[in-house]
Amino acid sequence: MATATLHLPAGAITVDAAFREEVARLSGQPLELCFQCQKCASGCYPTQEGDYTPNEIMRLVQYGARDAVLGSRTIWLCTSCETCGLRCPNGIRIAEVMDTLKQMAAARGIAPAGETGPLFHNLFLSEIRAAGRVHETMLMLKYKLKTGNLFADMKLGWQLFRRGKLPLVPRLKKDPAVRRIFERAGGQE
């Protein structure tokens, strides 16, 4: 694995050219087409809370800045709403790239300090793997127990419960197709 150091105004970063190819292969997206028009960033709400904008993440991936990207808070804030992909003039589905980066970070146990996104990500995938879909109430209960933040969002939770968005009884039916998807994905869960 060839590495080098890139000196940017924000400081020196270690780059790994294989990282760009790995992300392109896993996401299936033409990363080389991003020319930094910033349309993705202009429609991205989580950008306000992240450490990089989507176009900056794309540029860091193009540089091969593996550590900077996988340690970024931005990848965990992405909700995969697809706004960035719809705005991209080159048809790059940036949400697919962000999902790939989340998977790569999770596989390596990389998580920004204080960020609960990786925990939620793993719990979400565990629910999907176990039952074929998410039982929202159980997912939120597990998340709240693991974070120790049981009473935050109680008002919102009550409103969702009253509207039937957090059912007590799961309406789940195991689907063998989901199990096959996880088997095909192998270790990339």
Image (cartoon, rainbow, N blue to C red):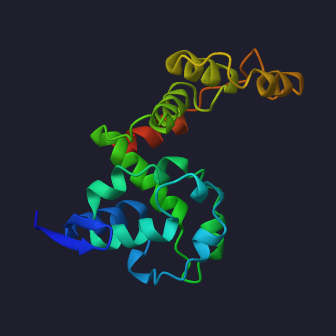
Compared with residue 74, is residue 92 higher up or lower down, i.e. above or below?
below
| Residue 26 figure quarter | bottom left
Tell which of 161 and 50 is nearer to you.
50
Compared with residue 105, is residue 21 higher up or lower down, i.e. above or below?
below
Decide if residue 173 is on the left or right side of residue 186.
right
Q: Position of residue 182 (x, y in %)?
A: 43, 39
Question: Image point 34% across, 65% down: which residue?
Answer: 25
Question: Image point 49% across, 28% down: which residue?
Answer: 126
Tell which of 28 and 79 is nearer to you.
79
Q: Position of residue 6 (x, y in %)?
A: 21, 72
- For residue 28, say whether it is visible: no
Question: Image point 82% across, 21% down: which residue?
Answer: 158
Decide if residue 2 is on the left or right side of residue 96.
left
Image quadrant holding the C terminus, namely: top left
Decide if residue 26 is on the left or right side of residue 3.
right
Q: Position of residue 58 (x, y in %)?
A: 42, 69
Tell which of 128 and 13 is nearer to you.
13
- Outermost residue on the right side: it is 163
Tell which of 184 and 33 is nearer to you.
33
- Outermost residue on the left side: it is 2
Compared with residue 99, is residue 63 higher up or lower down, i.e. above or below?
below
- For residue 49, say whether it is visible: yes
Q: Position of residue 28 (x, y in %)?
A: 42, 66
Compared with residue 187, is residue 70 higher up or lower down, i.e. above or below?
below
